[in-house]
Amino acid sequence: MRRWLQELLAAFQFLTRLPLPSGVDFQPDALSRSAKFFPVVGLVVGVGASLLFHLLTPHLSRAITALLIVTYLVLVTGGIHEDGLADAADGFGGGWKREQILTIMRDSRIGSFGAIALVLSLLARCLLLSALPATHFMAFAVSAQVLCRWTTLPLSYFLRPARENDGQGARIAQKVSRTSLAIGTLLTLVIVSYALRKAFWIPLLVSSVISCLSAIYYSRRIGGVTGDCFGATNQLTEIAVYLCGVWSV
């Protein structure tokens, strides 16, 4: 039980900027073992967004409320997923060969492809969140945050790290066990099915397709996955789930 608690705290430490208890001793492989709790992190972040929605909606327009919620999502995660999206867009958009792509992705400076991807991601989330029906906001906000973090599990289980001994990809890619994949997927299914009821299968299917296509693309272009790839797939999945909510409700 204590080990699971440490893994849960490790998941929150890696994916958020939330204050955590001090003095927790994390093992070197804590990140890969904590991956099964990534959906739980998504649940907490999504509930926070939903509470913010219910607090702000009576006083502000939906557009301003959506902007503040997206701001909260960026702040609570430290922009880790947005940074990954921008770096991946620069790498895949500006590079042709594997080594060139990886070199561009490592560059901390943002390029034109990264800036465009970042702007489109923020704009899409603001527009879609403002268009979600109020009665279904919490269901889709929570489901989006859970599913987008779940995508790291299959990507890291099936793909090898593009950089063997460097970066976040090397710390987790092909180091997630089958048990962690199963537990994380089960947690995701329970949370999303409870939130969306009978409609849960549509966002789940869309998220699975995005994960599969991302895995094929990353494998063909760079022979594996990096931390930036996780962030890019995360952002695409979050946007897709919001779109499901706007489209189907």
Image (cartoon, rainbow, N blue to C red):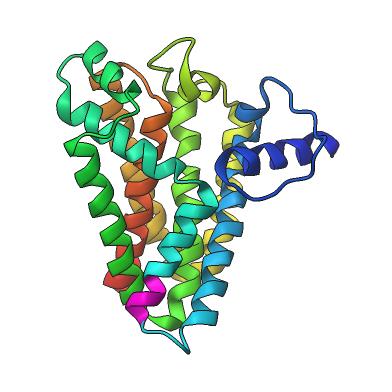
Q: Is residue 249 left or right of residue 144?
A: left
* Count of numbered circles on the image: 0
Q: Residue 100: x, y in percent?
A: 22, 15
Looking at the rendering, the stretch of residues picked out in magenta corresponds to: 62-66
- Toward which corner of the image does residue 189 lie, by quadrant? bottom right
What is the quadrant of the C terminus in the image?
bottom left
Q: Position of residue 95 (x, y in %)?
A: 17, 21
Q: Is residue 94 above or below residue 2?
A: above
Q: Nearer the viewer, residue 241 or 52?
A: 52
Q: Residue at x 32, y 23 (%)?
A: 107
Whether the magenta-drawn stretch holds residue 15 is answered as no
Q: Residue at x 33, y 39 (%)?
A: 85
Q: Main secondary structure of the magenta part?
A: helix
For image coordinates 61% across by 58% down, the residue present is 44
Q: Does any portion of residue 37 appear in the rendered image?
A: yes
Q: Position of residue 1 (x, y in %)?
A: 84, 39
Q: Is residue 40 above or below residue 70?
A: above
33 relative position to 60: left or right = right
